[in-house]
Amino acid sequence: MMRSDDRPVILWLRRDLRLTDHPALTAACAGGRPVIPVFILDDQVAALGAAAQWRLGQGLEVFARTLADRGSRLILRRGPAQEVLQALIAESGAGAVHWTRAYDPISRERDGAIKSALKAQGIDARSFPGSLLFEPWTVQTGTGGPYRVFTPMWKTVRGRDVAPPLPAPGRICAPEAWPVSDRLQDWALGTAMRRGAAVLAAHSAPGEAAAQDRLARFIDEGIARYEQRRDIPGVEGTSGLSEYLALGEIAPQRCWHAAFAARERGGAGAETFFKELVWREFAYHLMYHSPQILTGNWRSEWDDFPWNTDRSDPRVIAWTRGRTGMPFVDAAMREMYVTGRMHNRGRMIVASYLTKHLMTHWRIGMDWFAEHLTDWDPASNAMGWQWSAGSGPDATPYFRVFNPESQLAKFDRDGSYRRAWIAEGQVSPPDTALDYFRAIPLCWGLAPGDPYPAPIVSAQEGRRLALEAYQNRSVAGAHDGKT
C-alpha cells in the first residue's frame, strides 16, 4: 500500500504553461513525490474565442513536449473540473492537488468549491500565486479599500519587493503508472479558426523557451528605446510578451526582474515598462474587487447611455472587417486577423472609433477581440474597452475622442504601418497585407484589388456626434487614471 506521504500530487494546469517561476509546481516537486500534470478542457476553456483556443492548443503541444523531455507527461482530460479531478484522484491514489490561482469570478467560484470538496475528503488542495506580481488583496489604499485609480496604485507598488524568479525543478518525479490521457488533436482546439489558422501559425512562436528568448531580446535590444518607440506601430517597439503572459508561458515576476536588472545597467525605458506591467496588475485588481467590469459598466451611471447594440449594423460590420475607410482603424483590425495580436496604440484607436465615432457599445468590441486575439486576457480586455468607452476608470472619460487621421499622421509618419496591412491601392502589397485576405472567411467576398472604401464616418463628424451625445449626460465621479 502507498504511504500517505508518497501519494502523487496532481498539478492542475491552467494559464501557467511553464516550468520556471511556478510556485505550484515547485511545491509539488519539493517532497520528491510523483507529480501528475493535468490540463482540463472544461466549460470555461470551451468558451474561449477561436484565436485564443487555437493559441492554447499550440501552447499545450509545446508544453507537453517540454514535460516529456523531463521524463514527465501532460495528461489531458475533458469535462467539469471537479469531476475530472475526482476521477484522477481515484485512478492515481493522489493525495494532493495544486494549482495556480485565477482571479475572475467564475474561476474563483469553481476553485473555491473544488478546494472545499477535496479538503472534505482529506485531499491536500492548495492554490498558489504565480499569475500576478502582487495578489489583489495585498494592494490597498490608505483607508484599506481597493484602488479605483491607476496612478496612486502605481505609486504604492512601485517600490515593493517582487518575488524573485524560481528555477525549474531539478526533477519531476513520475508516477508508477500514468493515467490515461486524451489526445490533443482530438480536442480540435483550432477548428474554429478554419483557414486562418495557417496564417496565424506564421506569426506565433509558442512556449516557455520562445517567451524567454523574446524577453531577452527585448531587454537587450528594445528596452532602452521603449518609451520612445512603444507607441509607433510600424516598428518593433513593444516587448511582444502579451501572448506569453496571457497563457502563463512566462511569469510577470521574470519580466519585472529582467527590467530591474536592465535599469541598474542604465536601461532608460525600464520605468515605463514597469508601469505597463502594473497597468496589467491594475486590470486584475479591478476585476477581482469589482468583477462586474467583465460584463457591465464599471461606472453604473453609464447603464442608460444610448450606445448602439445592433451587431448587424453595416457600420459595425465594416469595423469588424477592417473596412471603415479609416486607415489606422483598418490596419489595426487587419493586423489582428493576421497575427492574432494588435499594437496597443491600434487598440486604443479602434476602440475609440467603435465606441465614440460609431457610438457602439463597448461589449461588442470586447467580444470581437475575445474571438480574434491570441493574447486575449479577460481583465485587460474588459478594462481596456471600458477605458476607451468612458465607462471605466479614467480621468477623461468622454472628451477623449481619438482622431484616427491625426493619430496616423503622428504615429505612422512614413506610412509603414498602413502599407504593411492594407493591400488596396498598392501595386505590390507585402505578404502581411495579402495575408488578411487569406485569413478572412471567403464569404466576405473581399480581394486585394478592391477599391479602398470611403470613410463610413469621418473623423470630424464622428467626434462631433460623440461629444454631443456625451456632453448631454451628467457624468459624475471622474477619476484620475492612466492618460
Image: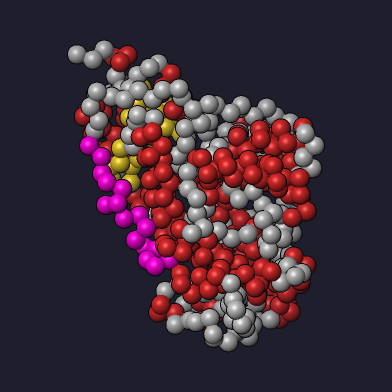
Numbered circles on residues, count:
0
Check the picture and name the quadrant holding the N terminus: top left
Q: Residue at x 56, y 68 (%)?
A: 432
Left or right, 261 with reference to 173: right
Residue placed most toward the observer, 64 or 358 = 64
Boundaries of the magenta span: 180-196
User: What is the quadrant of residue 154 in the picture?
Assistant: top right
- Asked if the magenta segment contains residue 83, the reply would be no
- The residue lying furthest to the left in this view is 1
Rendered residue at 53%/81% (across/down): 448
Q: Which residue is nearer to you in this view: 349 or 251?
A: 251
Asked whether 184 falls inside the magenta stretch, the response is yes
Is residue 267 visible in the rendered image? The answer is yes
Indicate the position of residue 423 as horizontal and vertical percent values.
Answer: 58, 77
Q: Position of residue 394 (x, y in %)?
A: 70, 54
* Residue 477 visible, this angle: no
Q: Position of residue 226 (x, y in %)?
A: 73, 49
Residue at the farthest front position? 428
Q: Quadrant of the C terminus?
A: bottom right
- Residue in the picture at 53% in, 73% down: 434
